[in-house]
Image (cartoon, helix red, strand yellow):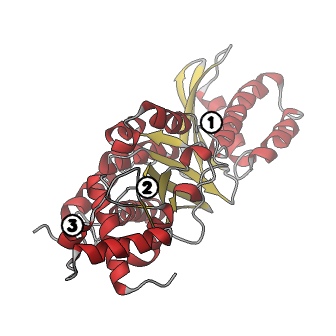
Amino acid sequence: MELSERKKQILRAVVENYIQTADPVGSKAIVASSGLKVSSATIRNEMAELENMGLLEQPHTSAGRIPSPKGYRLYVNELMEEHRLSMQEARKINDALNLKIREMDQVMTEAGKIISQLTKYPTFALTKGTKQAVITRYDLLMVEDNAFIAVLMTDTQAVKNKYFRLPSPVSQTQLQLLGTLLNTSFTGLTLAQLQPELARVSSHAAGEAYGPINLVVSFAMEVLEELESNVVHTAGIPTLLAHPEYQSLEKAEPLMNYLSEMGGETANLPVVQGENVRIVIGPENVADELKDSSVIMASYDIGGGMQGVIGVVGPTRMDYADLAARLSYFAEGLSRMFGKGEIPPPGGDGGDEEP
């Protein structure tokens, strides 16, 4: 869609004023903020044309206009300037990353909480990938004569442990032999491969020996099933109520229920493909509950063919440039943390100094 430079300036001013105030934007506000040397009457005529083009809407009998989803999309694609994080913003994100959380589901939970605190919007976090997870190592730790802890490590950097109590005592030597067997026969196998291997080993193992093997391998299958379920972690859902668009319970409740019940259901979530940050505006969302909201997502590499996605959900009146910059920076930090075991330097790479 071709717009004159003046129409672009007016549309940008409407979007950015509405993001800040949540009130319909009138011609006087445009004159004050856009720098255009034209009369209010000229601005009103241009706004009427933008409305006819489907880029602005006039709510009820208000004299002002608000952006339409189509207007937001044009703004994001063509008019939005890249937002650079300040040193203070970058430092806050880096401080969070410095926690060096390593267990995958804990990362997903904590990443969502941190992003919600930084953005003041609800967040979601999930992992997805083309590769099935496998167990890479088993460690067995003696606790008592008839009890031990199994520690499992996966190729997605998840570490899980479980306490087992046996009906009869087991020696340290027996436990070491069990650990050797597990690391020899049950590593590098997918969830689908573990059950047949367990059946094969059971045909050769003595009755007493099979019991602990079955316990640990069954736990390994539970771990892999959980990792492959693509569970969505959400945080900050009550923050919706702080925004004018959701102060009506009738408007807020369906979205809050949708976010609360996401669980492992990712089918209706937008997907980030071939891009680091994706913005989905209003009606572009598949889920009906998101039709009046926008979703901003950023992806990061976990390694081993796995990708993580973090996102925020809020009204279409969001500061897309600022939120995209925060999510992108946070995702880049997570990629470095998982890929190389490092994070950005404390000041951030290229953040602007505070004035």
Q: Which is more N-terminal, label 1 or label 2?
A: 1
Provide the residue designation for mark 3. Answer: 28
Q: CA distance from mark 1 to mark 3?
A: 79 Å
Residue 207, how many percent across, how many down?
A: 82, 23
Q: Of helix, strand and loop, which one carries label 2?
A: loop
Residue 257, how many percent across, how many down?
A: 53, 33
Q: Which is more N-terminal, label 3 or label 1?
A: 3
Q: Which is more N-terminal, label 3 or label 2?
A: 3
Provide the residue designation for mark 2. Answer: 316
Quarter where residue 180 is shown: top right
Residue 342, how many percent across, how many down?
A: 37, 63
Horizontal side of 147 relative to 123 (left or right) equals: right
Q: CA distance from mark 2 to mark 3?
A: 23 Å
Q: Which mark identifies residue 249?
A: none
Q: Of helix, strand and loop, which one carries label 1?
A: helix
The one of 60 and 309 positioned closer to us in this rendering = 60
Provide the residue designation for mark 1. Answer: 176
Q: CA distance from mark 2 to mark 1?
A: 58 Å
Whether label 2 touches label 3, CB < 8 Å:
no
